[in-house]
Image (cartoon, rainbow, N blue to C red):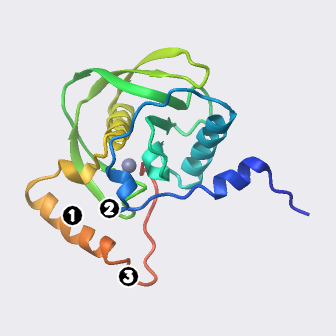
């Protein structure tokens, strides 16, 4: 017989918000305290992120309007992966690369991001950490922190790429085609 843990039940109750959900467009306030309830929710986010094969997930993406995110760019399932009230302290350079988003299934576009960032955040234990990230990790930080401000990667596109994407967004808003399955790898 298969038993389901309380954590799994909570995680199952957590659903990924898909564009154009209103939850994705709010500017989230800071999280003020981490009790057992918040910790359970944060761990649920981490589980959902892995289940969806994402490298990052922000609170608003599960309808939780606070400044929290989970991230594991290398997928190693170790080290600090839950970050509270993150902020970008420094950015440097420009990097162009394709990115996607779990809340915009099937969409990808080349987005300009800083190539290197220094961020500060709190751990679930209330410790302040500063991290330096480059490349994909720097991109993931910028993408997730954007989510906390109600910003999506599609907002950063212009020109022909933006136009093509807006056409596909319309189909996403009007509902996916029957039987279509979006690739999920490397989305956050
Ligand atoms: Zn995203």
Q: Measured from the top left, where is residue 24 in percent x and y? A: 36, 52
Task: Find the distance from the CA under tag 2 to the CA under tag 3.
Answer: 14 Å
Residue at figure coordinates x 13%, y 64% from the top left: 163
Disc 2 vs disc 3: Cβ atoms closer than 8 Å? no
128 horizontally vs 11: left or right? left
**Residue 169 in the image, given as x and y percentages of width and height:** 26, 67
Label 2 secondary element: loop
User: What is the crowding at mark 1: few (fewer than 14 residues within 10 Å), some, or many (at least 20)?
Assistant: some
**SS state under label 1:** helix
Which mark is first along the chain, 1 or 3? 1
Rendered position, 96 above or below 181: above
Q: Which quadrant of the structure image shows residue 43? A: top right
Pinpoint residue 71: horizontal percent, then vertical percent: 49, 37
The image quadrant that residue 80 belongs to is top right
- The first of marks 2 and 3 along the sequence is 2
Could you say where residue 143 lies in the image, as x and y percent from the top left?
33, 41
Look at mark 2 in the image and give the residue it sits on. Answer: 107
Q: Residue furthest right?
A: 1
Q: In the rendered image, which residue does mark 1 sit on? A: 165
Compared to 87, does 69 lie above or below? below
Q: Residues within 10 Å of mark 2 (few under 14, many from 20)?
A: some
Residue 100 visible in the picture: no
Task: State the residue position of label 3.
Answer: 177
């Amino acid at each position: 017989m298969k038993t389901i843990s309380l954590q799994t039940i909570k995680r199952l109750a957590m659903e990924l918000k898909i564009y154009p959900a209103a939850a994705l467009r709010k500017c989230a306030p800071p999280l003020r305290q981490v009790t057992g309830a918040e910790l359970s929710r944060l761990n649920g986010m981490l589980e959902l992120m892995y289940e969806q094969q994402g490298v990052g997930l922000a609170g608003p993406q599960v309808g939780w309007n606070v400044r929290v995110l989970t991230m594991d760019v290398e997928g190693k399932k170790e080290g600090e992966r839950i970050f509270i009230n993150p902020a970008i302290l420094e950015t440097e350079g420009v990097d162009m690369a394709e990115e996607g988003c779990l809340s915009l299934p099937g969409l990808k576009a080349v987005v300009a991001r800083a190539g290197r960032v220094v961020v500060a955040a709190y751990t679930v234990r209330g410790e302040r950490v500063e991290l330096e990230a480059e490349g994909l990790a720097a991109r993931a930080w910028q993408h997730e922190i954007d989510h906390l401000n109600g910003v999506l990667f599609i907002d950063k596109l212009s020109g022909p790429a933006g136009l093509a994407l807006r056409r596909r967004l319309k189909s996403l808003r009007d509902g996916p085609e029957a039987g279509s399955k979006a690739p999920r790898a490397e989305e956050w």
